[in-house]
Structure formats: structure tokens, C-alpha cells
Image (cartoon, coloured by chain):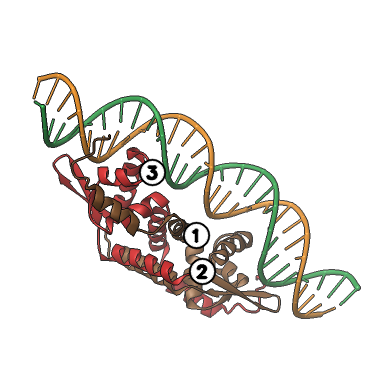
Chain colours: A red, B brown, C green, D orange
Amino acid sequence: MIKHCPRIDDPLLNKIIQDIPDEMVITRISAIFQAIHSETRLKILFLLSKKEMCVCELDYMLDVTQSAISHSLRVLRQLDLVRVRKDGKFAVYYIADDHVWAIIDLCRKHVMECNS
Amino acid sequence: MIKHCPRIDDPLLNKIIQDIPDEMVITRISAIFQAIHSETRLKILFLLSKKEMCVCELDYMLDVTQSAISHSLRVLRQLDLVRVRKDGKFAVYYIADDHVWAIIDLCRKHVMECNS
DNA sequence: TGAATACATGAACATATGTTCATACATTTA
DNA sequence: TAAATGTATGAACATATGTTCATGTATTCA
């Protein structure tokens, strides 16, 4: 029998544990943040939020190699944060869905309202 | 004179570059996502969203050492995502930033609606 | 006052991540 | 069809990150 800190209310805490998202969901959310924590990928999302772009256009605006951009796009694609459309020899990327839009927008707002 | 892909519209792209958040802001947003990409820190935020908790309570619910929890809390604190209140010998942590919480919840929705 | 409890911190280490380089593939253009 | 253009991928590497262990500090309780 383990002794606990007096603040611990077992039934309450056990209920709370049931209440939060399960491991699988946590892992997937974590993967999303893992993806967009990279400055390059974050910039890509901000850029694509202005208009859909092919890899060349992104390459024109970012200070990393085209290879790095393609790798980054793959990560974003695999999490369904962006999607591709083939247009001749171009790969045109765009923001995948409204959730992602909302996330980008919240980031913007957070920045605007935060003077720290 | 560099030759560009025909899709590149220099004036447009240069305008877009001005439009997205600058380096400093990108770095800061990136730091926030970096912080909440850790599964432990993500769980901490979900737990604290239910009620404020001392380190003991978090320790009771998480499968990492108390040391790891303290380290994680420090990261969250430094970004002002959580704050501490001292209560006797207890350190009571609580959520500080609503925007970030909103972003986390959006991700949760994104994940739940995604069957991939 | 001494022991116990709650929490924080630094060092160390294994693992994960982002980038570049080299190269391959696909589509277009001359 | 050959060359050029646009994109993707794998290997390699330097760096960053999360965790644990060991230990330190502060507060409480007996």
C-alpha cells in the first residue's frame, strides 16, 4: 500500500484519467505538433495559407534546399495537413482542410495578442 | 540572372513574403509547438485542463519519473503555457494560455475526424 | 530539531530530427 | 528522342530532445 500526497483524491483522478484522450489520440496529436514545430514546415503552412504553390515557388521563398522542402512536404502530407495536385510536371500543394486553416489562424491571433 | 519556373510570379511572391510572420514570430510559434509536441507535456496540458494540479498529482497519473515531470513543467512554464502557485510545500500548476489550449483542441478534433 | 515530503536541477545518454548531398524518376520541350 | 526542368527519395551526419539518476533545496510534521 503506497502512501500518497494528501492532495491526491484517487476516485477523482481516476475519473480524470478516463476523461482525457487515449494514447492513440495523444500520439497522433503529438505527431501533428511534431510536424509543425519545424520552422521550415511552419513557414510552408503560412505560405500555403496565402495561395497554393508548387515546390518551385516554395523553393524561391525559403532558404533551404529543394530537397529539404520536399522532405518537409512529405511529413505534412502524411499527416494530411497539406495535399498535392499534379499539374503537368508541377506538384501543387495546398492546405488540406479547415482544421489546419483554423490552427494557422489561431497562431496568427496568438502572436498578435502576445507582446511578450 | 536566374531562370525561374514559369509559375513564379516575382511581385506576387515577394508581397506574400512580406505578409507572413517574420523570423522572430516564427521562432516563437515554433517553440510553442516544440513544447507541446512531447507526449508527456501534451498529457500534462490535458490533465491541467481538467483541474489545477500539484506535481504529485501529475506524478500519480503519468508513467514517467517526477524528475521528467518537473523538467516538462519548466518548459511549459518558460513559454507561459502554464503557471505555478505555491501552496505550502506544494507547487500547484494551472493552464495559462487559452489560445494554445484552443489549438490543442482543434488538433484533437482533426485527429478524431481523420480515419487514416 | 530531525525526518519526511514535495519539488527542482544538472549531468549523462540514447534516440530522434532536419538538413544536405547525391541521385533517381517523371514530365515537358526543343 | 535528347536535354532540361520539376520533384522525390535514401544515406549520412551534426544537433536537439526527453528521460533517468543523483542530488539539492524548501517546507511541513512529529
Left or right relative to A40: residue A15: right
Q: Are marks 3 and 2 in contact (CB under 8 Å)?
A: no
Residue A46 percent location from the top left of the image: 33, 57
Q: Is residue A80 visible?
A: no
Left or right relative to A18: residue B20: left
Image-quadrant location for residue D23: bottom right
- Chain under numbered label 1: B
Q: Are marks 1 and 2 in contact (CB under 8 Å)?
A: yes
* Element class at badge 2: loop
Q: Nearer the viewer, residue D14 or A112?
A: A112
Q: Are marks 3 and 1 in contact (CB under 8 Å)?
A: no
- Residue at image mark 1: B35
Say which residue appears at 47% left-offset and 70% top-offset: A114
Q: Nearer the viewer, mark 3 or mark 1?
A: 3
The amino acid type of the residue labelled 2 equals Leu
Gap in angstroms between the C-alphas marked 3 and 1: 24 Å
- Chain under numbered label 3: A
Gap in angstroms between the C-alphas marked 3 and 2: 30 Å
Mark 3: few/some/many CA within 10 Å (<14, 14-19, 20+)? few
What mark, if any, has residue B81 been given in the picture? 2
What mark, if any, has residue A63 been given in the picture? 3
Gap in angstroms between the C-alphas marked 1 and 2: 9 Å
* Element class at badge 3: loop
Q: Vertically, is A26 above or below A61?
A: below
